[in-house]
Amino acid sequence: MKYALIIPDGAADEPQGTAGGVSPLEAARTPAIDQIAQAGVVGRADHVPRELQSGSDVGIMSLMGYDPLVGHTGRAPIEAAAQGIELNQHDWAIRCNLVTVSGGRMQNFTAGHVDNHVAQALIGHLQQDLDDDSPWQYFSGVSYRNLLVHRPRADAGKAMFSSATRSTPPHDLLDLPTREHLPPGPGAASLCELMDRSRELFAGSDVDSQATQVWFWGLGPRPGLEPFVERFGKTAAVVTAVDVVRGLGGLMGLTVIEVEGATGYLDTDYAAKGRAAVAALKQHDLVVVHVEATDEASHDGNAAAKIEALERIDECVVRPIHQALVEFGEYRILVSPDHPTLLRTRTHAHGHVPIAACGTGLPPDEHERYDEVTAGRSSLVFDRGCELMPWFLGDSC
Ligand SMILES: [Zn+2]
């Protein structure tokens, strides 16, 4: 049996003030996904536990069948995995944003989408300022998204931080005073010292940039995720252009497939992703295709772009994969976003997302359309989203 999962990131939404009062999923022309809905079942799943921030790091972990309340240790360790940074037992990775703080308030959590070479120069200043035997190490990423890793000395025998070390994402602090949202808990004082030091170093630097300091958040140790093949007895590959999904795939032991022209943005080469997925089906039991464009359109507040992205995913990803699966004989196909991203707020939300699945052993239900309203009427509900994958791979009926 062959399996495919297509993830239109952040596709779930709410009725819009324009476009006839319907959601983007209702407005978009998606004949291939509707065909899955008609041939199979429509339901809903909640991939982001209330206790956790909504995002792909949590939602896709759940979608792949891992309970985020057990497996999710933070965003940074997943990004570290994406960059090939090894974390040992007591090491912690910490997300290091380049930010603009002015008048004591968080003005810009990306330092104006700082250029890569500027970001590298600033991260270089921070690293050079550390002693050679420092337990801290900075890693340049892309633009404002960088990492700091803490590796305790061998004689320490334990991590510097614990789950009681809290942090606040800088995008939740816009226009708020940073002083009231500094990290508390074990090890946090050292993080505050490094943030203070970055302020001095950036002020004295001749690098021209909007970045006034670094802001640390999303910290955690390496998550101990059981390899997917051991958990479910299926080999799997993931097609993605996004770091956090690449990192999760690596931590789950998936084959990560890079596609030329896949940008993670609205101009991504959808057809290339579809072709890569079809090719990967020959070698793997399950192929996962993640498309970021729907999420990006939501962050831009662009309803037309979100609808267009959905139509392109339908035409260039879902349709060819479904066609290829039919030729394999026994198969199942599933469409599910990771979390809602609302055009209204331009940010991730909690709540159920619509799912549609069809194929061998999945007799059709009475629902014929793939959207939030139809999914809301269905009795097929996964309040713990991590139970969807075992259902999809199991003896479902
Ligand atoms: Zn997003």
Image (cartoon, grey):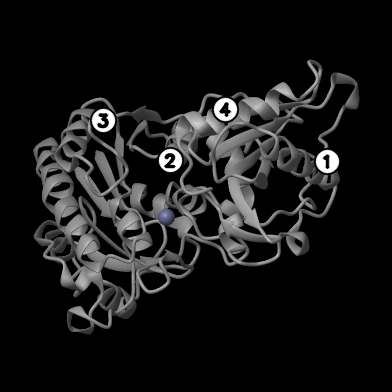
Residue 347 in the image, given as x and y percentages of width and height: 44, 64
What amino acid is labelled 2 in the image?
Val
Q: Residue at x 66, y 34 (%)?
A: 148
Ligand 1 within 8 angstroms of badge 2 C-beta? no
Q: Are marks 1 and 3 in contact (CB under 8 Å)?
A: no
Q: Earlier in the sequence, mark 4 or mark 2?
A: 4
Ligand 1 within 8 Å, label 1 CB: no
Q: Quadrant of the N terminus?
A: top left
Return the x and y of residue 50 as percentages of the image width and height.
58, 67
Q: Secondary structure at mark 4?
A: helix
Drawn side of residue 170 relative to residue 285, left or right: right
Do tag 3 and tag 2 residues touch (Cβ < 8 Å)? Answer: no
Q: Which residue is mark 3?
A: 259
Q: Tell me which label, 3 or 2, sits earlier in the chain.
A: 2
Image region (quadrant) for ligand 1: bottom left
Q: Earlier in the sequence, mark 4 or mark 3?
A: 4
At mark 1, the secondary structure is helix
Under mark 3, the amino acid is: Val
Which residue is located at x 90 percent, y 21 percent? 155
Q: Disc 1 vs disc 2: which is toward the camera?
A: 1
> Is label 2 in a helix, a strand or a loop?
helix
Residue 396 shows in the view: no
Looking at the picture, does residue 303 appear above or below residue 130?
A: below
- Mark 1 or 4, nearer chain start: 4
Residue at mark 2: 245
Residue position marked by numbered label 4 in the rendering: 121
Whichever of labels 1 and 2 marks the residue nearer the N terminus, that label is 1
Label 3: how many Cα within 10 Å (few below 14, some 14–19, many 20+): some
Mark 1 neighbour class, 10 Å CA radius: few under 14, some 14 to 19, many 20 or more: few
Q: CA distance from mark 3 to mark 2?
A: 14 Å
